[in-house]
Amino acid sequence: MDYWDIALKFIVGLITIVLQINLSGKGNLAPSNAIDQVQNYILGGIIGGTIYNSQITNLQFIVIMLIWSVIVFTIKFLTSQNTTLNKLINGSPQVLISNGIINVRRLSKMV
């Protein structure tokens, strides 16, 4: 196993993560909605799965990361433009306290 290939894959993965964070305006990897959580899981799986697989070349890894980035930004764009799609993917907020009254039934469903 060539350690330079692994190091290059680590660097490409790190650069991809940093670019996705900066371009999406999040500021960190902490998920703020469901799609962010899924994005983090898949991104980690892609990076972890390809780092130790010598059959995947660095060029293939870069293309995979570019494809995933395009998918993520397309979903983010579509959810920002379409409220129905946004509610479908990210869900909608649940009001637990209204006018100082706690909605116990809804709260018990959330726990």
Image (cartoon, rainbow, N blue to C red):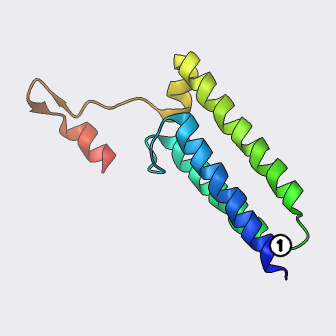
Q: Is residue 85 above or below residue 72?
A: above
The x, y position of residue 18, in whole percent, is 58, 49
- Residue at the spot 77% in from the left edge and 44% down from the top edge: 66
Q: Is residue 14 above or below residue 51?
A: above
Kindly identify the amino acid type of the residue bearing the numbered disc 1.
Answer: Asn
Q: Residue furthest left?
A: 100
Q: Residue furthest bottom?
A: 1
Location of residue 70 by image quarter: top right
Location of residue 92 by image quarter: top left
Q: Nearer the viewer, residue 20 or 107?
A: 20
**Which quadrant is the N terminus positioned in?**
bottom right
Q: Which structural element holds mark 1?
A: loop
- Residue at the spot 26% in from the left edge and 30% down from the top edge: 95
Q: Is residue 97 visible?
A: yes
- Residue at the spot 8% in from the left edge and 29% down from the top edge: 100
Q: Is residue 56 above or below residue 95?
A: below
Counting the numbered discs, the total is 1
Residue linked to disc 1: 53
Q: Is residue 12 above or below residue 105?
A: below
Q: Is residue 49 visible?
A: no
Q: Nearer the viewer, residue 57 or 72?
A: 57
Determine whether, in the image, residue 39 is placed left or right of residue 61. Answer: left
The x, y position of residue 106, in whole percent, is 27, 37
The x, y position of residue 93, in whole percent, is 36, 30
Determine whether, in the image, residue 103 is placed left or right of residue 47. Answer: left
Q: Nearer the viewer, residue 37 or 53?
A: 53
Q: Residues within 10 Å of mark 1 (few under 14, many from 20)?
A: few
The x, y position of residue 89, in whole percent, is 56, 33
- Residue at the spot 72% in from the left edge and 57% down from the top edge: 12
